[in-house]
Amino acid sequence: MTATKLRYILLGLIVVLMGGFSAGAWWVQGLLANSVRDTDHAKIDSEVSTAELQQLKTLQKQLADDQDIVERAKQIAVSTDQYRYQDQVIKDVSDYAARYGIRVNTIDFTSTNTPAASGAKKVAFNVSLKGPIPYTTFMLFLRDIEQNLTKIQVTSLTLAPDKDPKAVATPSLSLEVFLKS
């Protein structure tokens, strides 16, 4: 082996080693880039999870603070578990009438029951009142019926004029009460 051949062999070996080092550096740089990307994704996921957890804690605190509203919402529909829902409806209507000095003639539950869109059951009933009733008093009575946590809704109303132009004679109402199934 001559010195020239040895020089070419060593030069070839140096070129192969440099190529190997370049390929190795390129491969390691790709691994590091993937590792950085995965770390960034984990960091972003962590930040999103932290934000969602904070929102959940805020909502939980708000729900706890508004527990009275939740309890009131549960009372929106009368429960059919309580067989005495008719007694409660009669009491509510009678109380509203008594508040304004209105006398109730009859409360009739002979109407048919129908399912409501929400899954609750609607029970229709009729109320006839003894007239004459001053118009403004009657309107206040209706307002109280309609603002009773939506347990009762007015579906129709029959009015007749009285001799007094500011009063109505013997009004009757068709009402619905919503019952939890």
Image (cartoon, rainbow, N blue to C red):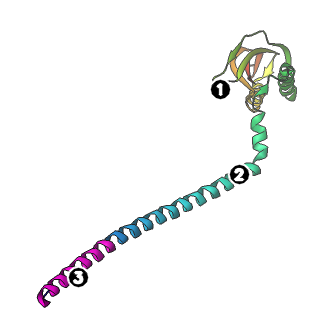
Name which residue lies at 80% across and 22% down: 80
Segment tinted magenta in the rendering: 2-25
Q: Secondary structure at mark 3?
A: helix
Name which residue lies at 53% across and 59% down: 45
Whether residue 152 is visible, yes or no, is yes
Judge from the rendering whether residue 3 lies leftward or rightward of residue 80; answer left or right: left
Measured from the top left, where is residue 101 in percent x and y? 87, 25
Residue 16 in the magenta stretch? The answer is yes
* Circle 3 residue: 14
3D distance between C-alphas at marks 3 and 1: 82 Å
Q: Is residue 125 above or below residue 42?
A: above
**Total labels drawn:** 3
Q: Secondary structure at mark 1?
A: loop
3D distance between C-alphas at marks 3 and 2: 68 Å
- CB within 8 Å, label 3 to label 2: no
- Closer-to-camera residue (108/171): 108
Give the amino acid at mark 2.
Answer: Gln
* Circle 1 residue: 118
What quarter of the picture does the N terminus occupy?
Answer: bottom left
* Residue farthest toward the front in the current orientation of the protein: 1
What quarter of the picture does the C terminus occupy?
Answer: top right
Q: Residues within 10 Å of mark 1 (few under 14, many from 20)?
A: few
The answer to which of marks 3 and 2 sits earlier in the sequence is: 3
Measured from the top left, where is residue 105 in percent x and y? 85, 13
Residue 129 in the magenta stretch? The answer is no
Q: Secondary structure at mark 2?
A: helix
Judge from the rendering whether residue 143 lies leftward or rightward of residue 9; answer left or right: right
Q: Residues within 10 Å of mark 3 (few under 14, many from 20)?
A: few
Give the amino acid at mark 1.
Answer: Ser
Q: Of circles 3 and 1, which is in front? A: 3
* Quadrant in the picture for residue 37: bottom left
* Circle 2 residue: 60
